[in-house]
Amino acid sequence: MTGTMNAILKTAPGPGNLAFSTRPIPQIGPQDILVRVKAAALCGTDLHIKHWNEWAALRMQPPVIIGHELAGEVVEIGSEVRHVNVGDRVSSESHIACNRCEICREGNRHVCPHTKAIGVHRDGCFAEYISIPEEIAFVYPNASLPWEQLALMEPFGVVVHGMLEYPLLARTVAIIGAGPLGTMGILIAKQAGASRIIVLEPNHLRAQEALALGADVVVDPSSEDPVAAVKKLTGGYGVHIAVDFSGSIPALSAAVNYVRPEGQLVCVALPSRPFTFDLAEFSYRGCVLKGIAGRRMYENWEQMRGLLAGGLDLSPVISHTLPLAEYETGMNLMEQGACLKCILIP
Ligand SMILES: [Zn+2]
Ligand SMILES: [Zn+2]
Protein backbone atom coordinates (compact mmCIF):
# COMPACT_ATOMS: atom_id res chain seq x y z
CA MET A 1 0.00 0.00 0.00
CA THR A 2 1.26 3.51 -0.74
CA GLY A 3 0.33 6.93 0.55
CA THR A 4 0.64 8.80 3.81
CA MET A 5 -0.88 8.46 7.27
CA ASN A 6 -1.24 10.35 10.53
CA ALA A 7 1.13 9.30 13.32
CA ILE A 8 2.54 10.45 16.66
CA LEU A 9 6.24 10.84 16.24
CA LYS A 10 9.08 11.22 18.73
CA THR A 11 10.92 13.64 16.48
CA ALA A 12 14.25 13.96 18.32
CA PRO A 13 16.02 12.88 21.54
CA GLY A 14 15.27 14.88 24.68
CA PRO A 15 12.19 15.80 26.74
CA GLY A 16 9.04 16.61 24.74
CA ASN A 17 9.68 16.43 21.00
CA LEU A 18 6.39 14.64 20.27
CA ALA A 19 4.39 15.65 17.20
CA PHE A 20 1.18 14.66 15.45
CA SER A 21 2.56 14.38 11.93
CA THR A 22 2.27 12.77 8.52
CA ARG A 23 4.39 9.75 7.64
CA PRO A 24 4.51 7.31 4.70
CA ILE A 25 2.38 4.16 5.14
CA PRO A 26 4.97 1.47 6.09
CA GLN A 27 6.08 -1.06 3.49
CA ILE A 28 6.05 -4.73 4.55
CA GLY A 29 8.69 -7.43 4.15
CA PRO A 30 7.92 -11.06 3.15
CA GLN A 31 7.24 -12.17 6.77
CA ASP A 32 5.31 -9.04 7.81
CA ILE A 33 1.68 -7.98 7.91
CA LEU A 34 0.23 -4.49 7.49
CA VAL A 35 -2.37 -3.67 10.14
CA ARG A 36 -4.93 -0.84 9.92
CA VAL A 37 -4.88 0.26 13.58
CA LYS A 38 -8.44 0.48 14.97
CA ALA A 39 -7.54 1.26 18.60
CA ALA A 40 -4.33 1.81 20.57
CA ALA A 41 -3.73 2.33 24.29
CA LEU A 42 -1.49 4.80 26.09
CA CYS A 43 0.99 3.30 28.56
CA GLY A 44 3.45 4.56 31.18
CA THR A 45 6.24 3.69 28.76
CA ASP A 46 4.93 6.39 26.40
CA LEU A 47 5.35 8.91 29.22
CA HIS A 48 8.93 7.72 29.81
CA ILE A 49 9.55 8.34 26.11
CA LYS A 50 7.92 11.78 26.32
CA HIS A 51 10.06 12.77 29.31
CA TRP A 52 13.12 11.02 27.90
CA ASN A 53 14.20 9.22 31.06
CA GLU A 54 17.34 7.10 31.15
CA TRP A 55 15.45 4.00 29.99
CA ALA A 56 14.22 5.78 26.84
CA ALA A 57 17.52 7.53 26.12
CA LEU A 58 19.35 4.17 26.20
CA ARG A 59 17.02 2.50 23.70
CA MET A 60 15.48 4.97 21.26
CA GLN A 61 16.87 6.59 18.16
CA PRO A 62 14.25 9.09 16.94
CA PRO A 63 12.49 9.76 14.71
CA VAL A 64 10.26 6.83 15.80
CA ILE A 65 6.46 6.46 15.81
CA ILE A 66 5.54 5.66 19.43
CA GLY A 67 2.84 3.29 20.82
CA HIS A 68 2.92 -0.46 21.43
CA GLU A 69 -0.57 -1.54 22.58
CA LEU A 70 -2.87 -2.07 19.61
CA ALA A 71 -5.73 -3.77 17.88
CA GLY A 72 -6.46 -3.63 14.18
CA GLU A 73 -7.46 -5.30 10.96
CA VAL A 74 -4.94 -6.97 8.65
CA VAL A 75 -4.99 -5.23 5.25
CA GLU A 76 -1.92 -6.72 3.54
CA ILE A 77 0.32 -9.78 4.09
CA GLY A 78 3.86 -10.59 2.94
CA SER A 79 4.60 -13.39 0.46
CA GLU A 80 5.86 -15.80 3.19
CA VAL A 81 3.04 -15.19 5.70
CA ARG A 82 1.18 -18.45 6.36
CA HIS A 83 -1.03 -18.13 9.44
CA VAL A 84 -2.54 -14.64 9.23
CA ASN A 85 -5.01 -13.52 6.56
CA VAL A 86 -6.26 -10.22 5.19
CA GLY A 87 -9.34 -9.25 7.21
CA ASP A 88 -8.15 -10.90 10.46
CA ARG A 89 -8.70 -9.01 13.71
CA VAL A 90 -5.37 -8.90 15.51
CA SER A 91 -3.63 -7.62 18.58
CA SER A 92 0.14 -7.74 18.88
CA GLU A 93 2.92 -8.76 21.21
CA SER A 94 5.18 -5.71 21.54
CA HIS A 95 8.45 -7.65 21.88
CA ILE A 96 10.24 -9.22 18.94
CA ALA A 97 12.69 -11.81 20.32
CA CYS A 98 15.73 -12.95 18.32
CA ASN A 99 14.64 -16.64 18.48
CA ARG A 100 18.29 -17.71 18.21
CA CYS A 101 20.11 -16.94 21.48
CA GLU A 102 20.48 -19.35 24.40
CA ILE A 103 17.74 -17.60 26.38
CA CYS A 104 15.27 -17.96 23.50
CA ARG A 105 16.29 -21.58 22.97
CA GLU A 106 15.72 -22.26 26.66
CA GLY A 107 12.09 -21.26 26.11
CA ASN A 108 12.40 -17.79 27.65
CA ARG A 109 11.82 -15.50 24.67
CA HIS A 110 10.11 -12.93 26.92
CA VAL A 111 13.53 -12.10 28.44
CA CYS A 112 15.64 -12.38 25.27
CA PRO A 113 18.49 -9.88 25.66
CA HIS A 114 18.25 -9.00 21.96
CA THR A 115 14.56 -8.07 22.06
CA LYS A 116 13.37 -5.26 19.81
CA ALA A 117 10.21 -3.47 20.94
CA ILE A 118 7.65 -1.78 18.73
CA GLY A 119 7.18 1.91 19.52
CA VAL A 120 10.69 1.96 21.01
CA HIS A 121 13.32 0.41 18.71
CA ARG A 122 11.07 0.49 15.64
CA ASP A 123 7.91 2.29 14.54
CA GLY A 124 4.90 1.73 16.78
CA CYS A 125 1.12 1.86 16.60
CA PHE A 126 0.08 5.45 17.32
CA ALA A 127 -0.59 5.69 13.60
CA GLU A 128 -3.18 4.64 11.06
CA TYR A 129 -1.05 1.68 9.96
CA ILE A 130 1.73 -0.46 11.42
CA SER A 131 3.89 -3.19 9.90
CA ILE A 132 4.62 -6.09 12.29
CA PRO A 133 6.15 -9.54 11.83
CA GLU A 134 3.48 -12.24 11.46
CA GLU A 135 5.13 -14.01 14.42
CA ILE A 136 3.93 -11.43 16.98
CA ALA A 137 0.35 -11.09 15.70
CA PHE A 138 -2.38 -12.58 17.86
CA VAL A 139 -5.52 -13.35 15.83
CA TYR A 140 -8.73 -12.89 17.77
CA PRO A 141 -11.65 -14.05 15.63
CA ASN A 142 -14.38 -13.22 18.15
CA ALA A 143 -15.94 -10.04 16.69
CA SER A 144 -17.91 -9.42 19.90
CA LEU A 145 -14.73 -8.26 21.65
CA PRO A 146 -14.56 -4.50 20.93
CA TRP A 147 -11.41 -3.03 19.34
CA GLU A 148 -10.82 -0.96 22.48
CA GLN A 149 -10.56 -4.11 24.63
CA LEU A 150 -8.51 -5.98 22.04
CA ALA A 151 -6.03 -3.06 22.25
CA LEU A 152 -5.44 -3.99 25.92
CA MET A 153 -4.02 -7.47 25.27
CA GLU A 154 -0.38 -6.39 25.63
CA PRO A 155 -0.74 -4.87 29.13
CA PHE A 156 -3.33 -7.52 30.07
CA GLY A 157 -0.68 -10.11 29.17
CA VAL A 158 1.88 -8.78 31.62
CA VAL A 159 -0.79 -8.81 34.35
CA VAL A 160 -1.73 -12.40 33.43
CA HIS A 161 1.98 -13.26 33.60
CA GLY A 162 2.28 -11.77 37.10
CA MET A 163 -1.00 -13.07 38.47
CA LEU A 164 -0.80 -16.64 37.12
CA GLU A 165 2.88 -17.25 37.85
CA TYR A 166 1.80 -18.93 41.11
CA PRO A 167 -1.50 -20.61 42.00
CA LEU A 168 -4.32 -18.32 43.18
CA LEU A 169 -7.05 -20.87 43.86
CA ALA A 170 -8.08 -20.82 47.52
CA ARG A 171 -5.19 -18.51 48.41
CA THR A 172 -5.21 -15.02 49.90
CA VAL A 173 -3.79 -12.44 47.49
CA ALA A 174 -2.68 -8.85 48.04
CA ILE A 175 -2.85 -6.57 45.01
CA ILE A 176 -0.70 -3.48 45.47
CA GLY A 177 -2.04 -0.53 43.49
CA ALA A 178 -5.46 -0.37 41.81
CA GLY A 179 -4.51 1.58 38.69
CA PRO A 180 -5.21 0.02 35.29
CA LEU A 181 -2.93 -3.00 35.78
CA GLY A 182 -3.97 -3.64 39.39
CA THR A 183 -7.59 -3.47 38.27
CA MET A 184 -6.92 -6.19 35.71
CA GLY A 185 -5.22 -8.12 38.52
CA ILE A 186 -8.38 -7.96 40.65
CA LEU A 187 -10.47 -9.31 37.73
CA ILE A 188 -8.03 -12.19 37.23
CA ALA A 189 -7.82 -13.05 40.95
CA LYS A 190 -11.61 -13.14 41.09
CA GLN A 191 -11.86 -15.45 38.09
CA ALA A 192 -8.97 -17.65 39.23
CA GLY A 193 -10.61 -18.40 42.55
CA ALA A 194 -8.57 -16.46 45.11
CA SER A 195 -10.12 -16.95 48.53
CA ARG A 196 -9.62 -13.33 49.55
CA ILE A 197 -8.49 -10.26 47.59
CA ILE A 198 -6.85 -7.54 49.67
CA VAL A 199 -6.08 -4.36 47.71
CA LEU A 200 -3.62 -1.73 48.92
CA GLU A 201 -4.51 1.66 47.44
CA PRO A 202 -4.41 5.19 48.87
CA ASN A 203 -6.59 6.83 46.17
CA HIS A 204 -10.18 6.87 47.43
CA LEU A 205 -11.83 6.69 43.97
CA ARG A 206 -9.64 3.77 42.92
CA ALA A 207 -10.40 2.05 46.23
CA GLN A 208 -14.16 2.34 45.61
CA GLU A 209 -13.74 0.96 42.08
CA ALA A 210 -11.64 -1.94 43.40
CA LEU A 211 -14.39 -2.92 45.84
CA ALA A 212 -17.00 -2.70 43.07
CA LEU A 213 -14.93 -5.06 40.89
CA GLY A 214 -14.46 -7.79 43.47
CA ALA A 215 -11.85 -6.77 46.04
CA ASP A 216 -12.88 -8.02 49.49
CA VAL A 217 -11.15 -5.25 51.38
CA VAL A 218 -9.05 -2.19 50.57
CA VAL A 219 -6.28 -1.06 52.90
CA ASP A 220 -5.29 2.61 52.66
CA PRO A 221 -1.53 2.60 53.38
CA SER A 222 -1.56 6.39 53.85
CA SER A 223 -3.82 6.14 56.89
CA GLU A 224 -2.87 2.80 58.48
CA ASP A 225 0.24 0.63 58.74
CA PRO A 226 -0.10 -1.81 55.82
CA VAL A 227 1.88 -4.61 57.51
CA ALA A 228 -0.28 -4.55 60.65
CA ALA A 229 -3.48 -4.19 58.60
CA VAL A 230 -2.74 -7.12 56.27
CA LYS A 231 -1.61 -9.36 59.15
CA LYS A 232 -4.76 -8.53 61.07
CA LEU A 233 -6.85 -9.54 58.03
CA THR A 234 -5.02 -12.87 57.68
CA GLY A 235 -5.00 -14.26 61.20
CA GLY A 236 -1.54 -12.84 61.83
CA TYR A 237 0.09 -14.94 59.08
CA GLY A 238 0.12 -12.59 56.08
CA VAL A 239 -0.99 -13.22 52.49
CA HIS A 240 -0.04 -16.25 50.41
CA ILE A 241 0.88 -14.05 47.47
CA ALA A 242 1.37 -10.33 46.94
CA VAL A 243 1.53 -8.83 43.45
CA ASP A 244 2.93 -5.33 43.11
CA PHE A 245 1.60 -2.99 40.42
CA SER A 246 2.79 0.20 42.11
CA GLY A 247 6.58 0.18 41.97
CA SER A 248 6.37 2.17 45.21
CA ILE A 249 9.33 1.56 47.52
CA PRO A 250 7.32 2.02 50.76
CA ALA A 251 4.71 -0.40 49.37
CA LEU A 252 7.34 -3.00 48.47
CA SER A 253 9.12 -2.55 51.79
CA ALA A 254 5.83 -3.35 53.53
CA ALA A 255 5.03 -6.28 51.23
CA VAL A 256 8.27 -8.13 52.04
CA ASN A 257 6.98 -8.20 55.62
CA TYR A 258 3.36 -9.24 55.09
CA VAL A 259 3.93 -12.18 52.73
CA ARG A 260 3.39 -15.30 54.85
CA PRO A 261 6.04 -18.02 55.27
CA GLU A 262 6.52 -19.88 51.94
CA GLY A 263 4.57 -17.08 50.21
CA GLN A 264 5.48 -15.18 47.05
CA LEU A 265 6.05 -11.51 46.27
CA VAL A 266 5.64 -10.89 42.54
CA CYS A 267 6.89 -7.59 41.08
CA VAL A 268 5.17 -6.38 37.92
CA ALA A 269 5.92 -2.67 38.33
CA LEU A 270 9.46 -1.36 38.59
CA PRO A 271 10.76 0.74 41.49
CA SER A 272 12.60 3.80 40.18
CA ARG A 273 15.70 3.24 42.33
CA PRO A 274 17.38 0.53 44.43
CA PHE A 275 16.20 -0.05 47.99
CA THR A 276 17.18 -2.29 50.88
CA PHE A 277 15.24 -4.93 52.79
CA ASP A 278 16.04 -7.68 55.27
CA LEU A 279 16.83 -10.60 52.97
CA ALA A 280 17.84 -12.85 55.87
CA GLU A 281 14.45 -12.48 57.52
CA PHE A 282 12.64 -12.87 54.15
CA SER A 283 14.72 -15.90 53.32
CA TYR A 284 14.25 -17.47 56.76
CA ARG A 285 10.49 -17.47 56.09
CA GLY A 286 11.11 -19.33 52.81
CA CYS A 287 9.57 -16.56 50.70
CA VAL A 288 10.03 -16.05 46.97
CA LEU A 289 10.68 -12.75 45.18
CA LYS A 290 9.76 -13.02 41.49
CA GLY A 291 10.35 -10.40 38.79
CA ILE A 292 7.96 -10.23 35.83
CA ALA A 293 9.09 -9.04 32.40
CA GLY A 294 6.76 -8.90 29.41
CA ARG A 295 4.58 -11.84 28.48
CA ARG A 296 5.61 -15.49 28.13
CA MET A 297 5.46 -16.04 24.39
CA TYR A 298 2.97 -17.31 23.76
CA GLU A 299 1.65 -19.14 26.80
CA ASN A 300 0.32 -15.93 28.40
CA TRP A 301 -1.48 -15.03 25.14
CA GLU A 302 -3.34 -18.35 25.25
CA GLN A 303 -4.17 -17.79 28.94
CA MET A 304 -5.63 -14.38 27.99
CA ARG A 305 -7.76 -16.03 25.33
CA GLY A 306 -8.93 -18.51 27.96
CA LEU A 307 -9.77 -15.86 30.56
CA LEU A 308 -11.77 -13.84 28.01
CA ALA A 309 -13.57 -16.98 26.85
CA GLY A 310 -14.40 -17.64 30.50
CA GLY A 311 -16.17 -14.31 30.73
CA LEU A 312 -13.54 -11.87 32.03
CA ASP A 313 -14.65 -8.38 30.99
CA LEU A 314 -11.96 -5.72 30.55
CA SER A 315 -14.38 -2.84 29.92
CA PRO A 316 -14.04 -1.41 33.48
CA VAL A 317 -10.34 -0.80 32.78
CA ILE A 318 -11.07 1.70 29.96
CA SER A 319 -11.82 5.18 31.30
CA HIS A 320 -11.30 7.38 28.23
CA THR A 321 -11.46 7.04 24.43
CA LEU A 322 -9.92 9.88 22.41
CA PRO A 323 -9.05 10.63 18.79
CA LEU A 324 -5.35 10.04 18.04
CA ALA A 325 -4.75 13.79 17.60
CA GLU A 326 -5.73 14.31 21.28
CA TYR A 327 -2.96 12.10 22.67
CA GLU A 328 -1.69 14.98 24.83
CA THR A 329 -5.02 15.06 26.71
CA GLY A 330 -4.58 11.36 27.47
CA MET A 331 -0.99 11.81 28.62
CA ASN A 332 -2.06 14.66 30.92
CA LEU A 333 -4.81 12.49 32.45
CA MET A 334 -2.23 9.75 33.10
CA GLU A 335 0.16 12.17 34.76
CA GLN A 336 -2.59 13.36 37.06
CA GLY A 337 -3.62 9.76 37.89
CA ALA A 338 -7.08 10.79 36.66
CA CYS A 339 -7.71 7.82 34.37
CA LEU A 340 -7.37 4.08 34.04
CA LYS A 341 -6.60 3.11 30.43
CA CYS A 342 -6.85 5.80 27.72
CA ILE A 343 -7.63 4.49 24.24
CA LEU A 344 -6.61 6.42 21.13
CA ILE A 345 -8.50 5.97 17.87
CA PRO A 346 -6.40 6.72 14.76
ZN1 LIG B 1 2.66 -0.80 27.64
ZN1 LIG C 1 16.97 -14.35 21.93
Image (cartoon, grey):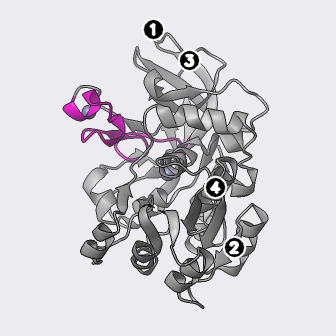
Which residue is label 4 attached to? 194
* Nearest-to-viewer mark from 2 and 3: 2
Q: Label 1: which residue?
A: 79
- Check disc 3 and give the amino acid type: Glu
**Residue drawn at point x = 45 percent, y = 8 percent:** 79
Q: For the residue with label 2, is its CB less than 8 Å from the closest atom of ligand 1?
A: no
Residue 76 - label: 3
Q: From the image, tell me which residue sits under label 2.
A: 217
What amino acid type should be assigned to the residue bearing mark 2? Answer: Val
Amino acid type for the residue under numbered disc 1: Ser
From mark 3 to mark 4, how far is it between C-alphas? Answer: 43 Å
Q: Residue furthest left?
A: 102
Neighbourhood count class around disc 1 (C-alpha, 10 Å): few under 14, some 14–19, many 20 upward: few
Dot 2, crowdedness within 10 Å: few (<14), some or many (≥20)?
A: some
Q: Earlier in the sequence, mark 3 or mark 4?
A: 3
Visible residue check, residue 133: yes
